[in-house]
Amino acid sequence: MSKKIFFMHPINHNTHHHHFFENKEIDALYFTSALTNFGQSLVSIFIPIYFWTLGFPLWQIMLFYLLRSGYFLVFSFGLLPLIRHMSNKMMMFLSVPFILLYYFGLEQVTSCNAIFYIIPGLVALNMLFLMSVIIWSLLMRLMAIKWGANWGFVVLLIC
């Protein structure tokens, strides 16, 4: 009796989806997106501390992040038809004014109470446009390898 050993197929690097360093423009967009996300993450660690030093109670700081998430969900469903037709460059370009207004709004949050409820929407729009570059690229790649029907929805829910 001969035993058959089943091996997984070796990865064929010619047909596998290794797209890094093929298109310099897209690689620059990914690098810029990663660098921007990293910088924003470093700053956003201190935003609750900034609110605390301004005298905001803990419930209001938590409300800020709840509003940010709520705005993100509303804008995601509301702007999804528009975003689907945009290029990666346009989405990254549109994310910049929102983050600038967000950081300027953080400075003015003590002078006007309404700004506290507006700036989570600005950061949500920034996140939507900036993260859409990565999300849509990932979804398109998953669809290209025939996983889009199942995994695309899962990735969208995770993001």
Image: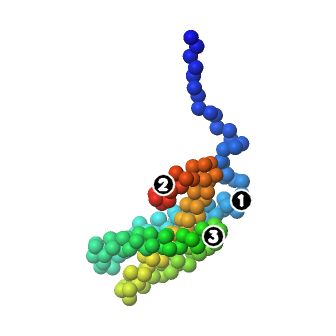
Provide the secondary structure element on which disc 1 rests.
Answer: helix
User: Which circle's residue, 2 or 1, is located before the other in the chain?
Assistant: 1
Describe residue 96's horizontal placement relative to residue 111 as left or right.
right
**Considering depth in this image, is 41 or 8 the residue closer to the camera?**
8
Q: Residue 1 appears at what percent x and percent y?
A: 56, 11
Residue 82 in view in this figure: yes
Mark 3 or 1: in front is 3
> In this figure, which residue is indicated by the disc labeled 2?
154
Q: Residue 87 appears at what percent x and percent y?
A: 65, 68
How many residues crowd mark 2 within 10 Å: few (<14), some (14–19), many (20+)? Answer: few
Q: Residue 21 appears at what percent x and percent y?
A: 69, 53
Q: Marks 3 and 1, Cα distance to the nearest angstrom?
A: 22 Å
Provide the secondary structure element on which disc 3 rests.
Answer: loop
Mark linked to residue 24: 1
Q: Residue at x 52, y 69 (%)?
A: 128
Q: Residue 61 appears at what percent x and percent y?
A: 33, 73
Q: Residue at x 54, y 65 (%)?
A: 131
Examine the image and state in which quarter residue 111 appears. bottom left
Describe residue 1's horizontal placement relative to residue 117 as left or right.
right
Q: Amino acid at mark 1?
A: Lys
Q: Are marks 3 and 1 in contact (CB under 8 Å)?
A: no
Provide the secondary structure element on which disc 2 rests.
Answer: helix
> In this figure, which residue is indicated by the disc labeled 3?
85
How many residues crowd mark 3 within 10 Å: few (<14), some (14–19), many (20+)? Answer: few
User: Which circle's residue, 3 or 1, is located before the other in the chain?
Assistant: 1
Mark linked to residue 70: none
Examine the image and state in which quarter residue 35 appears. bottom right
Describe residue 51's horizontal placement relative to residue 104 as left or right.
left
